[in-house]
Amino acid sequence: MGDQPVSLGEFLAKRFKEEVKFVSFHRRLTVHAIVAVLAVLYAMLYRGGSGLMEGARFGMLVGLYAVGSFVLHNHVNLNIGAKLTVQQAVAYFVEWTVVGIVIGLIYRGAVR
């Protein structure tokens, strides 16, 4: 009776979060999901060795994936030269190796 029709934009604005809040939440959610996936993968690949060596092995595997999927993708799609591509590859590989070592030092295998 007293309801006036509203535009779709007004309707959606009342039902969804502001874009700034949503973007912030989405970034945190993405980071947490990546950390959770990496932790589960590490636990599945864990062979029972020293945390340092197991973490380095895991980090190198993730680093190889990052080089193959992100660095080569950037080289093909962006106007960057071979020098920057190699620098990115080394940086990604070293960064992920360090992340793997940190995960390996934190993770404790199942108590047997």
Image (cartoon, grey):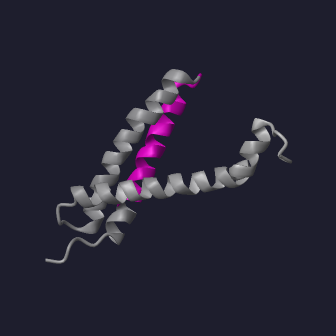
* Image quadrant in which you'd find residue 110: bottom left
In-front residue for pair 15/22: 15
Relative image position of residue 54 (x, y in whole percent): 25, 60
Q: Is residue 68 left or right of residue 29?
A: left
Main SS class of the magenta portion in the image: helix
Name the residue located 44 percent from the left edge and 29 percent from the top edge. 72
Q: Is residue 19 left or right of residue 57?
A: right
Q: Is residue 34 left or right of residue 104?
A: right
What range of the chain is rendered magenta? Answer: 79-100
Relative image position of residue 75 (x, y in whole percent): 50, 26
In-front residue for pair 37/42: 37
- Is residue 107 visible in the rendered structure shown here? yes
In-front residue for pair 52/110: 110
* Residue 98 is inside the magenta segment: yes
Q: Is residue 102 above or below residue 18?
A: below
Relative image position of residue 52 (x, y in whole percent): 30, 65
Q: Residue furthest front?
A: 1
Name the residue located 57 percent from the left edge and 25 percent from the top edge. 80
Relative image position of residue 61 (x, y in whole percent): 31, 46
Name the residue located 50 percent from the left edge and 38 percent from the top edge. 88
Q: Is residue 111 above or below residue 8?
A: below
Q: Is residue 60 left or right of residue 87?
A: left
Q: Quadrant of the C terminus?
A: bottom left
